[in-house]
Image: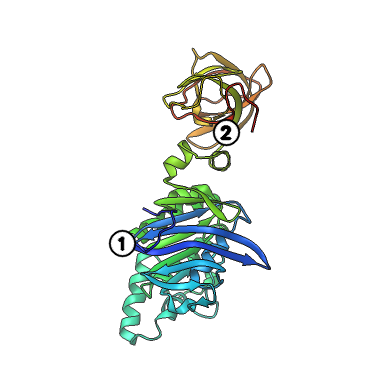
Amino acid sequence: MASAEPRSAPRADGLLHVKTIECRYQGTTVVRNLSITVDDGEIFSLLGPSGCGKTTALRAIAGFEPVYHGTISIRGEVVSRPGYILAPERRRLGMVFQDYALFPHLNIYDNVCFGLHKLERKQRHEIAEQMLELVGMQTMKKRFPHELSGGQQQRVSLARALAPRPELILLDEPFSSLDVSLRERLSIEVRNILKQQQTTAIIVTHDQYEAFAMGDAVGVMKEGTIVQLDTPYNLYHEPQNRFVAEFIGQGRFLNGTLLGPNQIETEIGIITSEKKFLHPKGTALDVLLRPDDLVPDDKGDLVAQVVQKAFKGAEILYTLQLPSGLTLLSLFPSHHNHEIGERVTVRIAAKHLVAFATRPAGGNAE
């Protein structure tokens, strides 16, 4: 699994090692102290808001940006360090861009063959046919890019990147120009293709669904560095800080006071969690309630009014207002179709309750 810990020497099983790199843009440091290790066959997602430095980090790995501190190594060979940068074409990397970057004057077959010019014609043909079949575009190989949909162009872009058998595929916001349903479907399809080829990949995205659907591991970036690297499950259920908790998923924070290892008193009552908190009794907490922490229950002890609803197919996301004026989010099965203004009853079912201390017991806020 990918690691964010700096290492004094590359692991034997690691393909890519990024060690404490710093990158700058127009004199401003945009990536700082960034360290990751990606193993063979792993797909690693770099997730973060716009301006956090994730694309700059990807460009440094590709060889398009210099590093001012630290090193980048591929298969144990240093390819970037201060004052030295190995050319991108010598790094055995494949790139898949946001805008596809296909050659408009070449048909699909010739686009895929473009990076195979050093091979014999028969070998080029065999590889191109194999790649087009892999991405489901073999029947369209004589078409030109403008004749394809966005999703089809992205498949061709992936086929072209895979054709030279690169050590590593880099994907820069590859689905951001597509509509939501196509983006979700294509991210799963691309992951399956990469896994079938046992290809190591890094995807940069601001979309958590893409990061979770694609990545074996996900690194969440803030202000140029990774603040948590973990599995998608742990990022959602065990965020290490408030930034990750707010960036991943949806939810509302409540003020709370710790009564015991797994009990927190809040304005909506005492919440009991399977997770135990190690803070002293009386510690003030910010408690995060996600939509899946509030479930419909006719016998529940919370009565709220529906103020907003968003139909999501199998589920409906309700914004609920309590008598106190507090609003919370709750996911209902879609057959629980309530109108705005209607009152519903819910209960808290927070097995993996997320909470952060705001001040120690009897102390002042930090």
Q: Which mark is residue 301?
A: none
What residue lies at 49% left-to-right and 30% top-to-bottom? 292
Please determine whether, in this image, residue 37 is positioned above or below residue 168. Answer: above
What residue lies at 33% left-to-right and 71% top-to-bottom? 130
Total numbered labels: 2
> Which quadrant is the C terminus positioned in?
top right
Determine contact: label 2, label 1, CB under 8 Å: no
Please determine whether, in this image, residue 2 is positioned above or below residue 59. Answer: above
Cα–Cα gap, marks 2 and 1: 39 Å
Q: Which residue is mark 2?
A: 251
Q: Give the mark nearer the N terminus: 2 vs 1.
A: 1
Give the colour scheme of this rendering. rainbow
Judge whether residue 333 can be spotted in this image: no
User: In what element is the residue under mark 2?
Assistant: loop
Question: What kind of residue is marked 1?
Answer: Asp
What residue lies at 46% left-to-right and 68% top-to-bottom? 72
Dividing the picture into quadrants, the one containing residue 282 is top right
Please rate how many residues cluster around mark 2, counting C-alpha atoms within 10 Å: few if below 14, some from 14 to 19, many from 20: some
Question: What kind of residue is marked 2?
Answer: Gly
Front-most of 168 and 241?
A: 241
Q: Which mark is residue 13?
A: 1
